[in-house]
Amino acid sequence: MHTIALIGPGAIGGTLASLLLENPDNQVTLCVRTPIDCLSITHQSETKSFSPTIATSPDALAPVDWIILATKTYQVPQAAAWLPALTGPETQLAVVQNGVEHLDNLQPSFPPERTLPVIIDCPAERPAPGKFIRHGDVFMSAPNVPAAEAFSQLFNHPAVTIDITCDWTTAAWKKLCINAAGAISALVDQPANVAAKPEAAAIMRSLIAECVAVGRAEGAELDEASIAEQVIASAAAAPPGAMNSLHADLAAKRPMEWQARNGVIARLGQKHGIPTPCNQMAAQLLSLLEQTYTA
């Protein structure tokens, strides 16, 4: 039996929770701010319901085998309040988030040697608290460390693929290229297929070029031309109305992860002496947009 606490049951976290709950070897606790009666997940017109343990406070919680942190990156300080009660001497923490700063964001809240960074592609949405829709399979990538195999074994589901890679830095920066380029959709309030327009594609190429340059300085092996064409072609072929999570957060007037997507490229670019004017401007514009409804 694996004891698991999942912090942050949004679209990603709730979908992961449902997949974990399908494995009878897992005992799952959802750490939430607002209580829910149950968790339901819909996929291809089939809905399944689960009744995990629901915790609205770390009080009275006991250490678990695994903590899965699936909050937005800007929510890490609040999420860290759950960690002391859930952490024992052998507890592992999987950080399933955007960006490339998984380990840095959790210091000093959790031992880095027991922290597993994970990137994810999970086509899902949360139409209401506790209710989730999964539109396709889930793909995750983690570095080739012993904890990765143990994490993989928590999921016993055909819809889940976990790639354990010897070059997680490259995998994370490739994903960041996708996320960085996706800022254009939010900035012009257009769905993902705006990438089919030459003007949008040109901006995306500039955002990706800067991400590649900084990623290479951080140790990633990236081919700018092929990544740019793949990202733009994929976005251009997206179904009508498809939104990335940054754009969806803007549309719903929620805080956005611009720091983890474009801001990090500007910050690390400054560290390496690499100019990143496009990502810096994107981050600043997204920040200004966010301030119009969060101020």
Image (tube, rainbow, N blue to C red):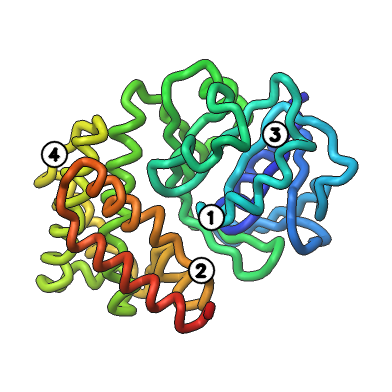
Mark in the foreground, 4 or 1: 1
Left or right position of 280 against 8? left
Asked which secondary structure carries label 4, the reply is loop
Residue plotted at (71% across, 61% down): 130
Which amino acid is tagged 3? Asn
Q: Residues within 10 Å of mark 2 (few under 14, many from 20)?
A: some
Residue bearing the label numbered 4: 223
Residue bearing the label numbered 1: 72
Residue plotted at (35% across, 39% down): 172
* Circles 4 and 1 in contact, beta carbons < 8 Å: no
Which comes sooner in the sequence, label 2 or label 4?
4
Which amino acid is tagged 1? Lys
Mark in the foreground, 3 or 4: 4
Which comes sooner in the sequence, label 4 or label 1?
1
Which comes sooner in the sequence, label 1 or label 3?
3
Residue 255 tag number: 2
Q: Residues within 10 Å of mark 4 (few under 14, many from 20)?
A: few
Which amino acid is tagged 2? Pro
- In space, the residues marked 4 and 1 are separated at their CA atoms by 28 Å
> Percent x, y for residue 81?
71, 47
* Circles 1 and 2 in contact, beta carbons < 8 Å: yes
> Percent x, y for residue 206?
14, 59
Which comes sooner in the sequence, label 1 or label 2?
1
Residue lying farthest right? 60
Between 91 and 29, the one lying in front of the other is 91
Asked which secondary structure carries label 2, the reply is loop
Residue plotted at (33% across, 79% down): 189
Which comes sooner in the sequence, label 3 or label 4?
3
Residue 23 tag number: 3
Mark in the foreground, 3 or 2: 2
